[in-house]
Image: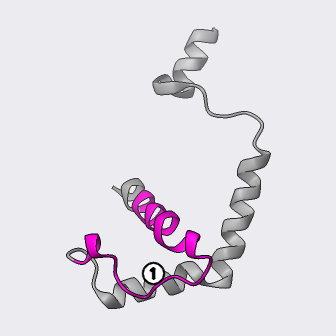
Amino acid sequence: MNIMWRNWKSHMYRIFIEPAEGDARYIVPDEYKTMINQQEWNDFIKARSSDEFLVKSAAAKERAKAQKYFHTTLRKGYAGLEYEMV
């Protein structure tokens, strides 16, 4: 459940806040009005537009770009990969 929550927040940021480059609208998008009240939306935009978050986000993007080897074990995980290698 935590992964779904994190992914949803990330999706909301990529769709509504990031394209606006810090000038996001403080009005809840119509398709989410039944799930989010105005105060929660304002808090979300403030949190995702803060300098602290932007620095953290930029650092994570740089680390992702620098990643040389990507996760390729599929569903078997590292235990399954180790079993295959032995």
Q: Toward the viewer: 23 or 65?
A: 23
According to the picture, the residue beneath numbered tag 1 turns out to be 44
Q: State the image quarter where residue 7 is shown.
A: bottom left
Scheme of colours in the image: one colour
Could you say whether the residue bearing mark 1 is in a helix, strand or loop? helix
Residue 13 x, y percent position in the rendering: 50, 68
What amino acid is found at the position of numbered circle 1 in the picture? Phe
Left or right: 75, with 66 as reference point:
left
The vertical placement of 64 against 57, above or below, is above
Q: State the image quarter where residue 3 is shown.
A: bottom left
Residue 25 on the magenta span? yes
Stretch in magenta: 6-33
The vertical placement of 28 against 78, above or below, is below
Which quadrant of the rendered structure holds the N terminus?
A: bottom left
The vertical placement of 29 against 58, above or below, is below
Which quadrant of the rendered structure holds the C terminus?
A: top right
Residue 55 on the magenta span? no
Q: Going 34% across and 81% down the picture, which residue do you hit?
A: 28
